[in-house]
Amino acid sequence: MKPLYVLVLSALLPLAAAAQSGAEASQSSVAQGQEAAPFAPVSASEVAFDSLLYVARPIVVFADSPNDPNYLRQMELLAADYPSLQDRDVILITDTDPAAKGEWRVKLRPRGFSLVLMDKDLKPVIRKPLPWEVREITRAIDKFPLRRQEVLERNPAGR
């Protein structure tokens, strides 16, 4: 009967260790006052262009109206997989008011619906006139030189 206890205990021990380390991590982040902000689209008027330099990868979705079918479809596609965008340090910026002539519109000059993928150096890398799925966006981001460098720094054995 004792070998059965040892088997059950050895099967449950890794789960207990993982639960304890997860609880410690959440306690330390709460103690430091850092709670993970939920990933959500941000209006272009709320984000300064230069404040994102080497901080986040902007994905900017432009449209002439918030009722544009391409805009609605793109937001639906993006909402399907926010965690994979968050893993790549993406900030999702939306601009549906062409009359406002905001900083993002002036710098990127979109025409109608436009999806602009930028790297952390704030250079536009890809512009798309039609909605893109998150899978395609993340694959494109993973090919950016700065993203490849980040992945190699996190996992140097992957060279």
Image (cartoon, rainbow, N blue to C red):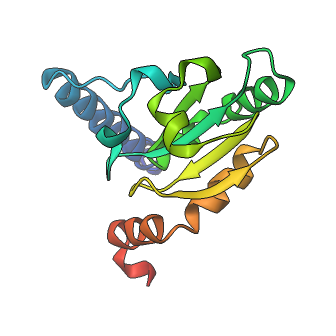
Is residue 4 shown to the viewer in this render?
Answer: no
Closer to the camera, 56 or 98?
98
Is residue 150 shown to the viewer in this render?
Answer: yes
Residue lying at the far right in this picture: please name it: 69
Q: Relative to 45, is 16 on the left or the right?
A: left
Q: Relative to 42, is 109 on the left or the right?
A: right
Closer to the camera, 42 or 136?
42
Residue name at image x 48 percent, y 50 percent: 88
Identify the image quadrant of residue 142: bottom right
Closer to the camera, 4 or 129?
129
Quarter holding the C terminus? bottom left
Q: How many marks?
A: 0
Q: Relative to 70, is 110 on the left or the right?
A: left
The x and y percentages for residue 67 are: 79, 14
Residue lying at the far left in this picture: please name it: 32
Residue name at image x 64 percent, y 61 percent: 140
The x and y percentages for residue 76 are: 76, 26
Residue name at image x 67 percent, y 51 percent: 137
The x and y percentages for residue 145 are: 47, 72
Identify the image quadrant of residue 158: bottom left
Residue lying at the far bottom in this picture: please name it: 159
Using the image, determine if residue 43 lies above or below residue 154. above
The x and y percentages for residue 157 are: 38, 80
Residue name at image x 53 percent, y 31 percent: 93
